Amino acid sequence: MLAGALAACAHGPLVVPTQFPAQAPEPPTLCPAHLVELTDSRRSMDGGRMGRRPIDGSAFPQWIFTGFATLFDTPHADADALELHAELLQAYSRYVATTKSATLALRVEYRQSGIRKGSNIYRGTVAGSHWSGSEAEMLGAFERALRQVLRQVRADTDALCELAHSAPNPDRSAAAPN
């Protein structure tokens, strides 16, 4: 009887959705910015395991792209906007007995008017008790990991915006307010 109940719990691989969950609107970044591209540099689409179930990580890039969209007012900002070019380095989950972890790692390069402004590698990691191995548990862990990454990206985006606004602009007249 127990074997039948355990077999009923295994429904095949857990699947990452293509849309990041909607959330309360974020305040806009300090300057126009948008994610131009997200490339997937992972060696495998394997997203690890949650309990005894494998995670199909093939939709991670699209899911992450929609997560980035929550940071910016418009998906296609003006020509002077800060452009983000992201690369997915890792997306996986691991579990050991009663503990689970979900990790995302992305490299983001910032450009403005074709000029590289900087880059950074961001990591989001969530570790905690492994309860059920359910899809909701897996998605919740990855969502928290991506929100960590997005907070870091937002802080760096705003810092670059502040630098751009504090730099002298030769196109402004001397009488223009700062």
Image (spheres, rainbow, N blue to C red):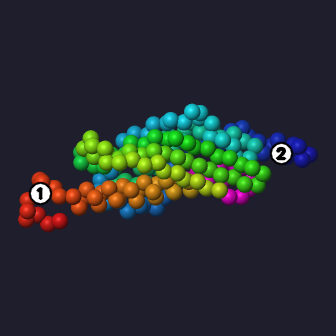
Q: Name which residue type carries label 1.
A: Arg
Q: Name which residue type carries label 2.
A: Leu
Q: Which residue is mark 2?
A: 6
The answer for how far apart the CA atoms under marks 1 and 2 are is 69 Å
Q: Disc 1 vs disc 2: Cβ atoms closer than 8 Å?
A: no
Q: Is residue 152 magenta?
A: no
Q: Is residue 167 visible?
A: yes
Q: Is residue 24 above or below residue 146?
A: below
Q: Which residue is mark 1?
A: 172
What is the magenta range? 128-143
Rate crowding at label 2 as few (under 14), some (14 to 19) or many (20 or more) other CA atoms within 10 Å: few
User: Mark 1 vs mark 2: which is more N-terminal?
Assistant: 2
Nearest-to-viewer mark from 1 and 2: 1
Q: Is residue 133 magenta?
A: yes
Quadrant where the C terminus sits is bottom left
Q: Residue at x 8, y 59 (%)?
A: 173
131 horizontally vs 140: left or right: right
Rate crowding at label 1 as few (under 14), some (14 to 19) or many (20 or more) other CA atoms within 10 Å: few
Q: Residue at x 8, y 62 (%)?
A: 174
Position of residue 120 measured from the top left corner of the image (x, y, whole percent) = 43, 49
